[in-house]
Amino acid sequence: MHTTQVRAQPGEAGTIGGLGVRFLVTGEQSGERFSVVEHPIGPRALAAPMHRHADEDEYSYVLEGQVGAQLGDEVVLARAGELIVKPRGQWHTFWNAGDTPARILEIISPAGFEHYFAELIEAFGGGRPPQEQLAELRARYHLEADPSSVPALISAHGLTFG
């Protein structure tokens, strides 16, 4: 890995519902060891249904706002300067728990899953893609999701989704 400075500038980015995506460090830059993705999250927005990764661990460092997360059966609230750990194999989701924008740095190890976000942005570019397309995308990235979890999460935490 060579040293790279990532400057605060608009970069390759997109939005999926209330979740923003900006790629800061890709696997190609880190020798495939990790990637870093910035996620701005709109007020009271649910980022994803409950899901779990087979291949990677995720670490969400809160830069601003309040971020709620469900980790298995546990619900946590993290504020700026705090870290949420989501190990591979654990069911989890996260959301903006406040009425102002929130922002996290998502550190993904090993790298590779950042490409899922890029493909998801492309898939949503023409509107909501068919469930079959989303299921195929999740399967390629060894991601298991439970879309049926969304209504309960929205109700329990006063959120919006999509």
Image: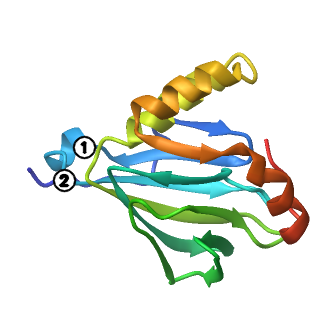
Location of residue 127 by image quarter: top right
Contact? badges 2 and 1 (CB < 8 Å): yes
Q: Percent from the top left, x then y, of residue 53?
A: 43, 51
Identified by mark 1, the residue type is: Gly
Per the image, the residue denoted by label 2 is 33
Name the residue type under label 2. Arg
Q: Looking at the image, which is closer to me, 60 or 25?
A: 60
Task: Identify which residue, 113 or 89, lies in the foreground.
Answer: 89
At x 19% / y 45%, what residue is drawn? 32
Most extreme residue toward the top is 126
Identified at 66% across, 72% down, the residue is 67
**Mark identifier at residue 27:** 1
Q: Is residue 130 above or below residue 108?
A: above
Residue 132 is situated, as x and y percent measured from the top left of the image, at 63, 20
Residue 12 can be seen in this image: no
Q: Is residue 149 above or below residue 157?
A: above
Residue 153 in sight from this viewpoint: yes
Q: Is residue 35 above or below residue 57?
A: above
Q: Is residue 128 left or right of residue 141?
A: right
Say whether disc 2 or disc 1 marks the residue closer to the N-terminus: 1
The percent position of residue 4, horizontal first and vertical second, equals 19, 52
Who's the residue at 69% across and 24% down the image? Answer: 131
Whole-Å distance between the Cαs marked 2 and 1?
Answer: 6 Å
SS at mark 1 in the image: helix
Q: Give the quadrant of the C terminus.
A: top right
Q: How many marks?
A: 2
Q: Residues within 10 Å of mark 1 (few under 14, many from 20)?
A: some
- Sort mark 2 into few (<14), some (14-19) or many (20+) by Cα contacts within 10 Å: some
Q: Secondary structure at mark 2?
A: loop
